[in-house]
Image: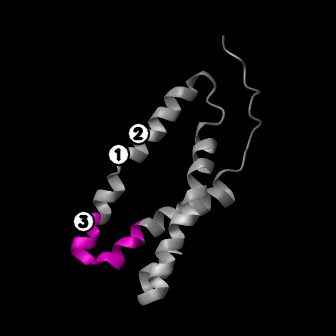
Amino acid sequence: VMLVATFTTGHVAMWALISVGLFHSIMFPTIFTLGIRGLGPLTEEGSGLLIMAIAGGALVIVQGWLADRYGLQISFLLTATCELYILFYALWGSRVTHALPEPVAVG
């Protein structure tokens, strides 16, 4: 969808950007859950690091620089690259190669 927004104009690009919000709304809880799965007693720390990485917003700054230098539409290639990596992770990178141990209650 981000590639559509990058390489088209007018209403098509506008609706592509609007639909990105809808697609991203389901991605965050899924990625967050997968990111902290299996951390055991380190779940709180892992959760905090994941939230800080998102709130840090480094990609927003880089995308702003790209927009200033190359144009707004071209800057969306950065986001498209990130989404392609997420697609790779969803299809191949998240495959479990070994059994995860059962969580142990701490307390």
Residue position marked by numbered label 1 in the rendering: 56
Element at label 1? helix
Quadrant (top left/top right/bottom left/bottom right) for the C terminus: top right
The Cα–Cα distance between marks 3 and 2, rounded to whole angstroms, is 22 Å
As drawn, the label of residue 52 is 2
Residue 84 sits above or below residue 37 on the image: below
Indicate the amino acid at tag 1: Gly
Residue position marked by numbered label 3 in the rendering: 65
Confirm or deny contact between disc 1 and disc 3 (CB under 8 A): no
Element at label 3? helix
**Residue occupying the point 52% across, 32% down:** 46
Q: Residue furthest left?
A: 69
The Cα–Cα distance between marks 1 and 2, rounded to whole angstroms, is 6 Å
> How busy is the neighbourhood of tag 3: few (under 14 within 10 Å), some, or many (20 plus)?
some
Confirm or deny contact between disc 1 and disc 2 (CB under 8 A): yes
Q: Main secondary structure of the magenta part?
A: helix
Residue 16 sits above or below residue 104 on the image: below
- Asked if residue 71 is among those painted magenta in the image, a careful observer would answer yes
> How busy is the neighbourhood of tag 2: few (under 14 within 10 Å), some, or many (20 plus)?
few
> How busy is the neighbourhood of tag 1: few (under 14 within 10 Å), some, or many (20 plus)?
few
Quadrant (top left/top right/bottom left/bottom right) for the N terminus: bottom right
Can you see residue 8?
no
The answer to whether 15 appears left or right of 96 in the picture is left
Choose the circle earlier in sequence order: 1 or 3.
1
**Residue occupying the point 31% across, 76% down:** 72
> What is the x, y in percent for residue 22?
56, 65
